[in-house]
Amino acid sequence: NYAHELAWKNFARNKRSYRTTTVSLALSILLFVSAGSFSEYLFGSYRDAVEISSYDVSVHLSGEDPASVQAIRERMRQAEGTAEIYHLYYMYVQFVIAPEDMTEERKAQERLGKDPQQATGFLNFLQDDIFAELLDHYGLDAQTYQEAGEPRAVVFCTTTNELEESYPVLAGSCDSLTCSLDAVEGEDVLWELPVGDLVEQPLAPQEASARCLYLRGTGNMNCLTLVYPESCMETLFATRNGDVQLWNGFAGETYYLAADHAAAAAELEQLAGADVYVQDVAAEEEQYRMVRLMIRVFCDGFLALLSLIAAANVFHTISTNLHARKRELAVLRSLGMTPRELAGMLNFECILYGCRGLLLGLFLSLLGTLLMYFMSHERSLAGYYVPLRYPLLAAVFVFLLVYAAMCYGRWRVKKERLLDAIRQ
């Protein structure tokens, strides 16, 4: 109808005012969506950087041999109010890989200036029941690892280089590995280790067993991970030359649940003595939650402040433009335009303002959120995304805000006397 035609003509006649209002709306949407996305990226990057643990206290043990580490663990069992949920023994070694046991991908590492025959590694000794779950997960024959007198390891032989390229180290024909142990005096000690299956799949301990919290060597560069059942540890170390004093120490990690984590950490530290590091994980997570709350409060407060500024800007722009047209609107009323028709014309203008400002604002917001993402979240494992609630909220509030500004301007115009408005 003619009210809508008048609205179109107004846009054509007042292009500067129309463009100013549209750009003002678009910039307000950009400000709101970009600030909201920035808070999500900032909060998300901090959340991704910290893992919530399934235990309260962890203890790192170290000693000269397995017996000394086991003795420390036995003493710590006297701690009251604690429940041990997982433990792991391990040893750091250097492997010497025979050329016939290497894959072609391993031999190609000479291009990076590395000796393909040298590799670091960890011997992990896992609880027998969890070791059985790991074998089942990877489809390995348990009989291979139950032969008396010859402990064998599951070898996870896929690793990465400095270029983050993943490749298998050992060929399928490899049935033993030689590790070099650092002697305190004299020549290094060579230790021959029989191996079982070579697994080229990435090692994911908690996928294999929910109770397997951690394995040494997982994700390390140029590193082999060997996993044995704990029951064969004594038999395996009996095959090593025990008369030579070594720099290679033996270590273990134990994880506990505790009703009072602070008291449990203090008691465990007292019972264990030297060569032990006790970590109160629950206390660190409480601190993390406080920091996370502070980040959320800061982000939400920052977003609310920017939203109020943007809303005030849009409201002021539209109501001022409408007040500047009071003479035009008074003339239309004097020519017989009813209040309903006047409201219809202004509501149509409201829809046009909202749609065009929203389209331009959302396009600019995509660019703005992309910039915010690279500023705060580029190292996260999550890819680029736009939090949908902010564009949706922007769309709803744009139309509500424009409509409220139109209603306020119309109310101001109605208060003016027709003759006074026309004379002005």
Image (cartoon, rainbow, N blue to C red):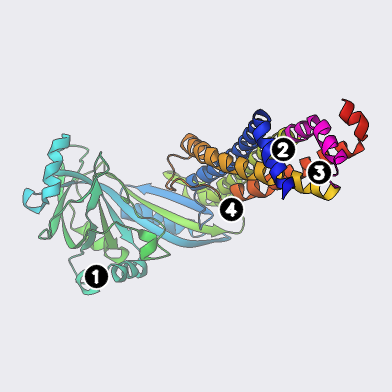
Measured Cα–Cα span from mark 3 to mark 4: 60 Å
Measured Cα–Cα span from mark 3 to mark 1: 74 Å
State which quadrant residue 384 falls in. Answer: top left
Q: Nearer the viewer, residue 79 or 110?
A: 110
Q: Is residue 325 left or right of residue 294?
A: right
Q: What secondary structure is marked by label 4?
A: helix
**Which mark is first along the chain, 4 or 2?**
4
Residue lying furthest front in this view? 335
| Label 2 environment density (alpha carbons within 10 Å; few <14, some 14–19, many ≥20) | many
**Which mark is first along the chain, 3 or 2?**
2
* Quadrant that contains the C terminus: top right
Residue type (three-letter) at the residue carrying disc 1: Leu
Residue 223 visible (yes or no): no
Measured Cα–Cα span from mark 2 to mark 3: 15 Å
- When the figure is inspected, residue 5 is found, relative to residue 327, above or below; the finding is below
Q: Which mark is residue 311?
A: 2
Residue type (three-letter) at the residue carrying disc 2: Ala
Residues in magenta, as a range: 316-338
Residue type (three-letter) at the residue carrying disc 4: His
- When the figure is inspected, residue 154 is found, relative to residue 342, above or below; the finding is below
- Residue placed under numbered mark 4 in the picture: 261
Question: What type of secondary structure mainly makes up the magenta span?
Answer: helix
**Which of the two marks, 3 or 4, is nearer to us in this view?**
3
Residue 303 visible (yes or no): yes
Q: Is residue 225 left or right of residue 422?
A: left
